[in-house]
Amino acid sequence: MRFMSFTVDGRATYGRVMGGRVSDVGAEPDVPPDLRAALAAGALEVIAARASQEHELAAISPLPVIPRPSKILCVGHNYETHRLETGRAKAQHPSIFTRFADTLVGNGASLLRPRISTMFDYEGELAVVIGEGGRNIAESDAMRHVAGFSCFNDASVRDWQWHTSQFTPGKNFPNTAALGPWLVTPQEIGDLGAMTLTTRLNGAVVQQARLEEMIFPVSKIIAYVSVFTELSPGDVIATGTPGGVGAKREPPRWMAPGDVVEVEISEVGLLRNGICDA
């Protein structure tokens, strides 16, 4: 099943995606008010069965799959190709940093290059959305805590990221990350490791990797982060980007107004965003 959050007729809602249409479950009075609440209530199966009003996908404006997650946890240098291009030493544990909810935009919205920088870089990633929360989750149990998967662009303001060894400033300018186009439940996915992640800039492939190339797989990441923080339904984990980022190209390739960046993951979907100046 596929679910998305969106706006239509000036209101925020959510529903199940079927072909080129999406149900308007959020318009009904007796359901959780948003997709994050629906996950917390364990209500996806109920929502999927509702005979709600439907809208053409072309008639709605997508929101981030989870518009305001309580946590956005991101993994750095989680593909060997990216670790090597950045010169990072091998690590025994995932490198974790955080994003704020106001950094997110949905599919089709513009990523905003901050006025203060021209070093705006793409990072295509797999996003994991938590369905069942918990602490100290065993790696062997981790995947049953997953509600589904989405595409993520962890776009980076590189000069601000490089001010210190801490990533926070370069990862938290408003409207600098994209999450979408929808959440795909694990039942819709075959072999997660066999899926291919591809990032395109203006139609040209700039990143490509199979998900099995992650240094720390999804189950290990969930187990690790759940030790230091309690995971909640609707939390988002961005699992890292492969090599090919703009900062490590010769010359560097920064995103600029008018560019279009796409993150596509086989069996998950295609996330497409233009670039504008803030």
Image: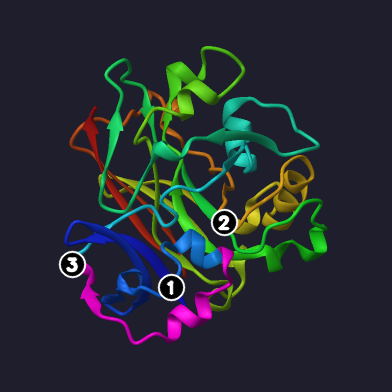
Q: Secondary structure at mark 2?
A: strand
Number of the front mark, 3 or 1:
1
Q: Which residue is mark 3?
A: 58
> For the residue marked with disc 1, what is the amino acid?
Val
57 in the magenta segment = yes
Percent of width and height locating residue 232: 63, 53
Residue positioned 50% across, 62% down in the render: 37
**Residue in front for this viewpoint, 22 or 192:** 22
Q: Are the residues at dot 3 and dot 2 in contact (C-beta closer than 8 Å)?
A: no
| SS category of the residue bearing label 1 | loop
Q: Residue furthest top?
A: 163
| Number of numbered tags placed on the structure image | 3
The quarter of the picture where the C terminus appears is top left
Along the horizontal axis of the image, is 22 left or right of 92?
Answer: left
Helix or strand or loop: what does disc 3 sit on? Answer: helix
* Residue at x 38% of width, y 52% of height: 64
Specify the quadrant of the image occupied by residue 90: top right
Mark 2 = which residue? 128
Front of the two marks 1 and 2: 1
Q: Which residue is mark 1?
A: 31
Label 1, label 2: how far apart the Cα atoms are: 24 Å
Query: Magenta segment range?
Result: 40-58
Q: In the image, what residue type sits under mark 3?
A: Ala
Decide if residue 144 is on the left or right side of residue 203. right
